[in-house]
Image (cartoon, coloured by chain):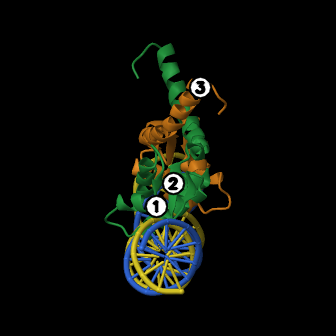
Chain colours: A green, B orange, C blue, D yellow
Amino acid sequence: MDDALRAVADPTRRAIMELVRDGERSAGDIAAGFPAMSRPAVSQHLKVLADAGLVDVRRDGNRRLYALRPEGLADAAGFIERMWSLQLRRLKKAVAADREV
Amino acid sequence: MDDALRAVADPTRRAIMELVRDGERSAGDIAAGFPAMSRPAVSQHLKVLADAGLVDVRRDGNRRLYALRPEGLADAAGFIERMWSLQLRRLKKAVAADREV
DNA sequence: AGGCTGTGTAAGCAACTTCTTACACAGACT
DNA sequence: AGTCTGTGTAAGAAGTTGCTTACACAGCCT
């Protein structure tokens, strides 16, 4: 989870995740989505994401295809949910007390 | 959201959030939970969390009381859910195809 | 007033991130 | 074989983070 949350802290990496969310995309294809940044920079981000278990990589001849791996976010989601649950408890209390939140 | 995800990327800050999850705690009280780290270090983490909207601060005489502010995680939760939804779609597809996941 | 107690802020340093450019190398195509 | 295409890796510069120690300062208590 540590790795996943650290990886997700970077906006470029989040954007990459959105890009590969709906299906495989090649490295170059992904890099084309960031014209302001060099291709190697994107490649390095892809490595961070892969190491964090947030994307899957597959070789296809010359190219490498990346796809989202949402399971990698499981622990992160767990943390957020654990924090959120306080909110839910508060809501319940509020409802019980029959007042506005 | 940027700030929140960046703030949450640090394990010390996550630990602090767990500490204040169930109710207000004073700065010193929180710092006592991290004997390996100086008090000012914890104070700086608290500032980051406050700036990111992840904790509320309240003065009580001498002390400052911190409490979790889960709403600060709303956007982060939104991102994770958006990523996670792919997983759900896959599940649905799997169910539709009547096979194992 | 004067001295604790609780806490934030400033300055500075070491470690880490995130880029960039230059290079390496495998796979496809003549 | 030779070369183009697609992609990763190495090295290094610049900025950022996360600590530490030293200091500042408000609020309580004689």
- Mark 1 vs mark 3: same chain? no
Label 2 neighbourhood size at 10 Å, few (<14), some (14-19), many (20+)?
Answer: many
- Residue A88 drawn at (x, y percent): 52, 26
State the residue position of label 1: A27
Residue B93, above or below C26: above
Are discs 1 and 2 less than 8 Å apart at CB? yes
Real-space Cα separation, disc 1 to disc 3, in angstroms: 31 Å
Real-space Cα separation, disc 2 to disc 3, in angstroms: 25 Å
Circle 3 SS class? helix
The residue under label 1 is which amino acid type? Ala
Mark found first going from the N terminus, 1 or 2: 1
Given residues C25 and B8, the one toward you in this image is C25
Given residues B92 and C21, the one toward you in this image is B92
Along the horizontal axis of the image, is A64 left or right of B74? Answer: right
Q: Which mark is residue B95?
A: 3
Real-space Cα separation, disc 1 to disc 2, in angstroms: 7 Å
- Mark 1 vs mark 2: same chain? yes
Label 3 neighbourhood size at 10 Å, few (<14), some (14-19), many (20+)?
Answer: few
The residue under label 3 is which amino acid type? Val
Q: Which mark is residue A66?
A: 2
The residue under label 2 is which amino acid type? Tyr
